[in-house]
Image (cartoon, grey):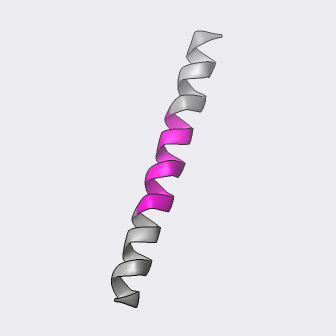
Amino acid sequence: LSEKKFLLNEEAVAVNKYFVSFETAYFSDGI
C-alpha cells in the first residue's frame, strides 16, 4: 500500500514539474 502511495506521489510530482516547466516556457516565449 505504501509502495503504491509512493508511486502515485512520484507521478504527481512529475506531472507538477511538467506543467510548471511548460508554464515557464510559455510565459518566457510570451515575453
Give the dominant element type of the magenta stretch: helix, strand or loop. helix
- Residue 24 is left or right of residue 14, and the answer is left
Above or below residue 27? Residue 31 is below
Magenta stretch holds residue 12: yes
What span is in magenta? 10-20
Q: Residue at x 43, y 52 (%)?
A: 17
Quadrant of residue 4 within the rendered picture: top right
Q: Residue at x 48, y 46 (%)?
A: 14
Quadrant of residue 29 within the rendered picture: bottom left
Residue 8: percent from left, percent from top: 60, 30
Total numbered badges shown on the rendered structure: 0
Residue at the right extreme? 1
Q: Quadrant of the C terminus?
A: bottom left
- Residue 12 is left or right of residue 22, and the answer is right
Q: Residue at x 48, y 41 (%)?
A: 13
Q: Residue at x 55, y 39 (%)?
A: 11
Above or below residue 9? Residue 24 is below
Above or below residue 2? Residue 20 is below
- Residue 21 is left or right of residue 13, and the answer is left
Residue at the front extreme? 31
Above or below residue 10? Residue 26 is below
Residue 20: percent from left, percent from top: 44, 59
Q: Quadrant of the N terminus?
A: top right
In depth, the one of 30 and 11 nearer the eye is 30
